[in-house]
Image (spheres, coloured by chain):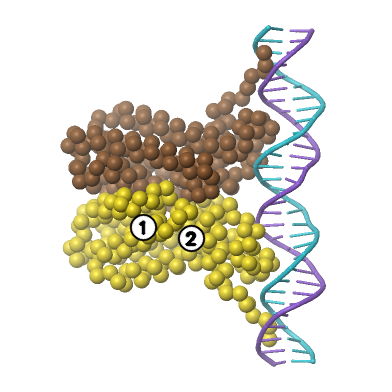
Chain colours: A brown, B yellow, C purple, D cyan
Amino acid sequence: MPKVETFNRNQVLQKATEVFHKKGYNGTSMQDLVDATSLNRSSIYNSFGSKLNLFLEVLSYYQSFHNNNFSQGLAQSYNATEAIETIFELSLTEILNDNDRKGCMIVNCKSEMVNQEPSIKSFMEKNQDRMIAMLEDIVYKGQMEKIFNQDQTANQYALYLFSSIQGLRMTGILNKNEKELRNLINTVLKVLH
Amino acid sequence: MPKVETFNRNQVLQKATEVFHKKGYNGTSMQDLVDATSLNRSSIYNSFGSKLNLFLEVLSYYQSFHNNNFSQGLAQSYNATEAIETIFELSLTEILNDNDRKGCMIVNCKSEMVNQEPSIKSFMEKNQDRMIAMLEDIVYKGQMEKIFNQDQTANQYALYLFSSIQGLRMTGILNKNEKELRNLINTVLKVLH
DNA sequence: TTCTTATTGAAATGAACGTTTCAAAATTAA
DNA sequence: TTAATTTTGAAACGTTCATTTCAATAAGAA
């Protein structure tokens, strides 16, 4: 019967992601989003409800983009060491390509909104659970393969790695020296062996 | 001759710090600051010039508060191990006392504003230099005392520790389990020995 | 064609934004 | 007391904010 949604939703999310990533949630205005998406103001509200709701979709979009990268990288890893290195390598690549010094949108959003917006807090809790589960899985396999030591449980190492990734993303905002960053990553991973 | 500034500047900065810390720069309105400081709107502009300028003073105030804590803690340390532990212990204490899940204001501001505001970028560069110099100094002493290994230079370890602290502060926003965090810190420091 | 629904454009909403203005009140040194 | 200067209160500045409204247009299904 009806006319159907004509614009490409993913394309719009992509554009909105760029703006939110660059300016943060509070720094982004509805006008910024209208300009970036070339979508009508009313269409944005029709399709996404509100600025916050659009932002939540953007977060999920950004998250699933990273998850896909992880999955793809992990599928190509031969063992736990390579798997962990893949994770850090992806972060490093993003840092080195991020000429605007935007950092990781999820880390940024965590620091901006967790204490202000319950829906964001809940998103971040799930994101942490997911990340730690993934890391724990890799570490556990590495410990079974006797590649990683058992000084700590896989879960404890997972939290350590999760924290280290966040630190790396924060450090990478100002420091883009590849050699220094690679050395930093090596130091982080040394404790596992 | 004239009437003299009557309000306590540090007290005003303290109040302004609380608001900015809780809501971030973009999330804080001038009205919020008027309410928090009980200072007149015009007095704020008379005394601080602009919102951004007040924020820069707040950042310095917050930074020097932490520097004092560091200096005080370091003065009581007997060796490099204790010195480093003191630094991380201070972060841990802040995390556990931060019931609002605000995180570290400097980390938050770095993620919110470095790519938007040159004066903030410059502040953060100096902050990083200062932190790394302090950490490098401690590590170097530890290496001289043969307490820390020499697998990496003091400067390399300093960047690693700086990154780890930022990661810890980000992790501490959602995770307040003291046992887990202490374990995380131990894992971070293990590589030094 | 007709019905149904989506998109568009443009304007308007009222509230909040950071900042300015200015006269009145307060305070202190001369 | 007088002169100089800061603080205060309150209002106003023009702009931008997120959101709503609504009539006009477009398009696929019946």
Q: Mark 2 to mark 1: distance in Å?
A: 24 Å
Which is nearer the eye, A22 or A47? A47
Q: Position of residue B111 (x, y in %)?
A: 48, 50
Looking at the figure, which quarter contains the N terminus of chain A?
top right
Q: Position of residue A70 (x, y in %)?
A: 37, 33
- Residue identifier under label 1: B92
Which mark is in front, 2 or 1? 1
Q: Residues within 10 Å of mark 1 (few under 14, many from 20)?
A: many
Give the answer, above or below, for where A140 lies relative to A171: above
**In what element is the residue under mark 1?**
helix
Q: Chain of mark 1?
A: B
Give the answer, above or below, for where D7 lies relative to D28: below
Give the answer, above or below, for where B9 lies relative to B56: below
- Residue identifier under label 2: B123
Which is nearer the eye, A1 or C22? A1
Give the answer, above or below, for where A188 lies relative to B40: above
Q: Evaluate if marks 2 and 1 touch, with contact meaning CB atoms under 8 Å apart.
A: no
At a point 19% along the width and 62% down the height, the residue shown is B147
Question: From the viewer's perspective, is B79 left or right of A65?
Answer: left
- Check disc 2 and give the amino acid type: Phe
